[in-house]
């Protein structure tokens, strides 16, 4: 049950991962999702949408003064994106490691960006970079009712309960 899964501190941590328009165009949604599933994280929200500019400007609020900001918004509105929420122990930090460095030139092989991208302007995927940032981004992209509270049957194989 859900109650049983609350046992380990941090097990209910959540992060926002998004497959950007280039990732959708290149049919990478399945492979990216698979990496989070096979790592052992629990999918609690998933949807495809055309990102509204207003929401993106909130999402990338901290970057609004960067020279690349207009082209970033143009890129992010160029086609549909897939947003998802993943849950599990240390998921924010682990997801950042799994997606790799922002600049694919620096991204290790074995990471999403290191395996599927070349240039910083088309780096395939997003993942929140802090627990607070994740909470903010999840609230920005999902309604509470779109997030599923469910018990994963293999919980005791993933965590000591
Ligand atoms: P992050 O996506 O790894 O968290 P941020 O610094 O938050 O990295 O930048 C957000 C996004 O803005 C990047 O993923 C990338 O798509 C884009 N971006 C960042 N720096 C540059 C740049 O120098 N040129 C073009 N796009 C950039």
Image: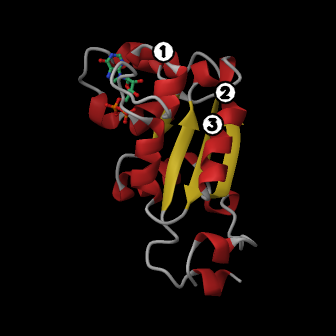
- The residue tagged with tag 2: helix, strand or loop? loop
Crowding near the residue tagged with mark 1, few <14, some 14–19, many ≥20 C-alpha atoms within 10 Å: few
- The residue tagged with tag 3: helix, strand or loop? helix
Q: Is residue 60 left or right of residue 154?
A: left
State whether label 2 is within 8 Å of ligand 1.
Answer: no
Q: Is residue 57 left or right of residue 3?
A: left
- The residue tagged with tag 1: helix, strand or loop? helix
Above or below for 65 versus 112 = above
Q: Which quadrant holds the N terminus?
A: bottom right
The residue that appears at 52% across and 70% down in the rendered structure is 12
**Label 3 to label 2: alpha-carbon separation:** 6 Å
**Label 2 to label 1: alpha-carbon separation:** 20 Å
CB atoms of marks 3 and 2 within 8 Å? yes
**Circle 3 or circle 1, nearest the eye:** 3
Q: Residue 49: in sight, yes or no? A: no
- Residue toward you, 37 or 136: 37
Q: How many marks?
A: 3
Q: Residue 23 falls in which quadrant of the image?
A: top right
Circle on res. 74: 1
- Residue toward you, 40 or 140: 40
User: Label 3 belongs to which residue?
Assistant: 32
The residue that appears at 44% across and 78% down in the rendered structure is 9
User: Label 2 belongs to which residue?
Assistant: 28
CB atoms of marks 3 and 1 within 8 Å? no
Q: Residue furthest right?
A: 153
The residue that appears at 23% across and 24% down in the rendered structure is 65
Nearer the N terminus, badge 3 or badge 1? 3
| Residue 114 horizontal/vertical position (percent) | 46, 26
Circle on res. 24: none
| Residue 160 horizontal/vertical position (percent) | 55, 80
């Amino acid at each position: 049950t859900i109650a049983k899964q609350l046992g380990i501190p941090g097990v209910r941590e959540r992060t926002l991962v998004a497959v950007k328009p280039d990732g959708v165009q290149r049919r990478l949604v399945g492979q990216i999702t698979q990496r989070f599933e096979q790592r052992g994280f629990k999918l609690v929200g998933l949807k495809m949408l055309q990102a509204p500019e207003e929401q993106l400007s909130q999402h990338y609020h901290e970057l609004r003064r960067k020279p690349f900001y207009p082209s970033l918004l143009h890129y992010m509105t160029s086609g549909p994106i897939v947003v998802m929420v993943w849950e599990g122990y240390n998921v924010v930090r682990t997801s950042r490691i799994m997606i790799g460095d922002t600049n694919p030139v620096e991204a290790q092989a074995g990471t999403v960006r290191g395996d599927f991208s070349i240039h910083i302007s088309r780096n395939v995927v997003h993942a929140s970079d802090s627990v607070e940032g994740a909470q903010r981004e999840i609230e920005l992209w999902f309604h509470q009712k779109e997030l599923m509270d469910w018990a994963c049957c293999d919980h005791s194989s993933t965590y000591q309960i």
